[in-house]
Amino acid sequence: MRNGPGKNAIQQRALRVLQQKKMYESQMNQLAQQTFNMESAALATENLRNTMATVDAMKTANKELRKQYGKVDINKIEDMHYELEDLVEQANEIQESLARSYAVPDVIDEADLEAELDALQLEDDEEGGSYLTDLNKVPDFVDEAPMERTEPVAKEAVKTTE
């Protein structure tokens, strides 16, 4: 545009529109800040209510616990504990008494056991071997020879070990 009264009028009008825009933006920012402040206050109020409810619950729980612990006598609990210990000790004594063996001495000397084992080995050597050395040999006390089977044996009825 050319300089003149028309251009000046348009510039004046553009300046007023920009001023209104800035004013509206400022008012929008103020409203946004007010909204934020109101929401913050509401949140703080709600948190305070929750805190008060928690404190009330803690007070009630404290009163109830005191009431319940007032009914508990620690001396009775300790007495009961000592009685249980005595009963367990008595039960152990009874079990030891019942488990006592009359034929075996309480203390067995390792040297005596080794000497007895050596003596058994000497007897075994003098007899010519152990009865376990020849498992297929027929014992001396058997008078008759084993009988041979003539019938085939069903494999299902008899289990064989090979």
Image (cartoon, rainbow, N blue to C red):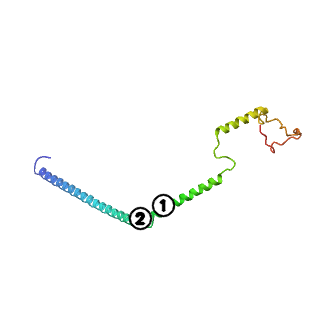
**Which is nearer the eye, 46 or 58?**
58
**Which quadrant of the view contains residue 20?**
bottom left
- Residue 29: x percent and y percent? 23, 56
In the image, residue 117 sits, relative to residue 8, either above or below, namely above
Residue 49: give x, y in percent of width and height. Answer: 33, 64
Residue 152 occupies which quadrant of the picture?
Answer: top right
Give the amino acid type for the residue marked by disc 1 in the picture. Answer: Glu
Amino acid type, residue under disc 2 in the picture: Leu
Disc 2 on helix, strand or loop? helix
Q: Residue at x 54, y 59 (%)?
A: 84
**Number of the front mark, 2 or 1:** 1
Mark nearer the N terminus (2 vs 1) = 2
Q: Is residue 28 above or below residue 153?
A: below
Quick check: marks 2 and 1 in contact, CB under 8 Å?
no
Mark 2 burial class by Cα count in 10 Å: few <14, some 14-19, many 20+:
few
In-front residue for pair 123/80: 123
Front one among 21 and 73: 73
* Residue that label 2 marks: 65
Please indicate whether residue 162 sits to the left or right of residue 78 in the image.
right
The total of numbered circles placed on residues is 2
Q: Which residue is mark 1?
A: 78
Q: Where does the C terminus fall, quadrant-wise? A: top right
Q: Give the number of the disc on residue 42.
A: none
Question: Residue 89, image x and y in percent?
Answer: 56, 56
Q: Residue 83 vs residue 42: left or right?
A: right
Relative to 4, is 89 on the left or the right? right
Q: Which quadrant holds residue 116?
A: top right
Q: Is disc 1 placed on a helix, strand or loop?
A: helix
In the rendered image, the residue lying farthest to the left is: 4
In the image, residue 142 lies at what x, y percent? 86, 40
